[in-house]
Image (cartoon, rainbow, N blue to C red):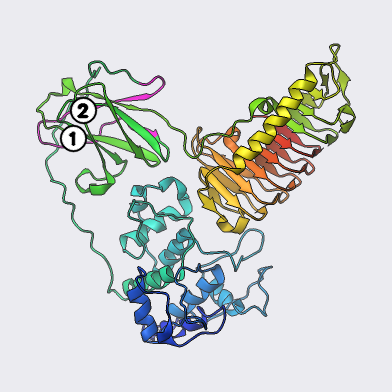
Amino acid sequence: MKRNTGKNAFVWVITLCLIFSTVGTATAAASVSDIKDHWAESAISSWVNQSLVVGYEDGTFRPEVKVNRQEFAALVNRSFVFTEAGTIEFTDVAQTDWAYSDIAKAKQAGYVTGYPDGTFKPKQEMSRQEVAVTIAKLLALKPSTSADLIKDLSSIPAWSKGDIGAVMDQAIMTGYPDGTFHPLQATSRAEVIIILDKALKVKAGQGTVVPTPSTLPVTTPVPVTPVATPVVPGSTPIPGATVIPVVSPLPGTISQPILNTATVAPGTNVTISAPAAGDTAWLAPTGTTIFAAGANMTSLTGNGTSTTVTAPLTAGDYHLFLVNAAGMSAASAGILTVSSVAVGPSPVNLGTAGNFAILAKTGISSVPNSAVTGNIGVSPIDATAITGLSLTMDATNEFAISSQITGKVYASDYTSPTSVNLTTAISNVETAYTDAAGRAVNYTELYSGDLSGQTLTAGVYKWGTAVLINSNVTLHGGPNDVWIFQIGRGITQASGTNIILTGGAQAKNIFWQTAETVSIGTDAHFEGNILSMTNITMGTNASVNGRLLAQTAVTLDKSTVVAP
């Protein structure tokens, strides 16, 4: 990175007005009117009073307006005094764009890159994890495991976790009061001022934070012997649950973590068949130092009976510790029962539509040879609307078969009870569509609908626009986690791209509710159940693990569909 090292680290701020006045004309420094009682009021006021940053022509500063990639690049260039511009060939950045020079400098400095499709996405909002990665790179911070202790760890991909931990160690960025970090959340103008100000102080050797010692008592762990068959009178482990022994140390001491651990997902409730009265069980994320765990630990007090106590935990592996206040021996320890609870919303009930891999109202067509594993059906249109599948009618006339289908083909004009069953299934599709569209939303307009290259954890996502998939998208979560995507328009997936499931996530628990056309490109791979108000089109050699449930037509082209 080339920088002007002869200048003081803080000379950059006088140029911030060039960045934060990208909308409208900058106004006088002292006239901003909308920061009173804002959490960043002091820092913003200081900068404004020194004419280091300015507001808008209407007298506002708009501290919560989100900062996009091109604005952030310009801020970093000026704050870290990067002056040398390199050559860029991003397809979505023109030489006439105001940020062209700053993006060229950022690329030359090496702290930003483009996307695999050759774009820079200059107007895409900067997420907190992207800001953390950039700051860590600029300050050459060593990756840290501190992010392992935050509550929404499951939403942090591997590529940003170490850098998030590093900036947290330096107190450049912190989590929220509830212990979360919100890595996917866009960063505001106020946050950028605070973060860059702290980063420059750390760079100047003025702001490194020394961790505060824990208030937990430091005692000498006492070696304990695990109980072969721990029992709590009257307690019954939940069927299929993982049972972990609680090992009691001597009175007043804190045990070392037991060897057994339980893997849970975000929001999972952990149930303890309570240890003896007076004992306190503590759950802490794996890697937590017991004497410095503090608020990272969850306390569950035993009552000596089979009554259970629940506490919601975030994703990850947990160790169990026990503070023994009753002087019990190891032989009388209790058990910990961990039961898995699904993350995200409850699944959308597909009803009898779940018996189909493809179900459509106006037709199903195929360019041979497609391969479908599961039943297909059309209603209220009749069998003439099924084309390209070379159907052979069964002797019962209730269904047909095809060499392209591992399953049965149903149409509204086939012998009873097929027509009635199809009417019910189509009604179930409509009900499922309405159900999915009405679920309470966790994330709104995330990434402006462009999911390219993103990793999404379980939850309900909503967009008023179309959703674009121009590079691989990862859905990460456990086998019981659920995703619901509410999409105001359609889905366009580029050729050769994939939706990838990790962590045990299953296609049957993924629901894409769309108001317009779903288009899956050539050689692309899709995961999940599509509930489309209109048509679904698959490109040549495209594949889907899931169901295609369309309220108009489904079109295949040498495509593969496998019902989960």
Q: Are marks 1 and 2 in contact (CB under 8 Å)?
A: yes
User: Could one spot residue 520 in this view of the protein?
Assistant: no
Q: Which mark is residue 247?
A: 2
> Residue 192, how many percent across, how many down?
43, 70
Is residue 466 depicted above or below 328 in this figure? below
Looking at the image, residue 167 sits to the left or right of residue 130; the answer is: left
Q: Which residue is disc 1 drawn over? A: 255
Rendered image quadrant of residue 437: top right
Amino acid of disc 1: Ser
Is residue 103 depicted above or below 388 in this figure? below
Label 2: state its secondary structure: loop
Residue at position x 74%, y 38% in the image: 550
- Along the line of sight, which residue is nearer the eye, 114 or 31? 31
Is residue 123 depicted above or below 484 in this figure? below
Looking at the image, residue 180 sits to the left or right of residue 76; the answer is: left
Rendered image quadrant of residue 300: top left
Spatial separation of the CA atoms under disc 1 and disc 2: 8 Å
Crowd tier of the residue under label 1, counting other residues whose Cα lies within 10 Å: few below 14, some 14–19, many 20 or above: many
- Along the line of sight, which residue is nearer the eye, 444 or 468? 444
Label 1: state its secondary structure: loop
Q: Is residue 262 magenta?
A: yes
Is residue 153 depicted above or below 508 in this figure? below
Amino acid of disc 2: Val
> Residue 89, how many percent across, how many down?
66, 71
> Magenta segment, which residues?
238-263
Taken as a whole, is the magenta stretch helix, strand or loop?
loop
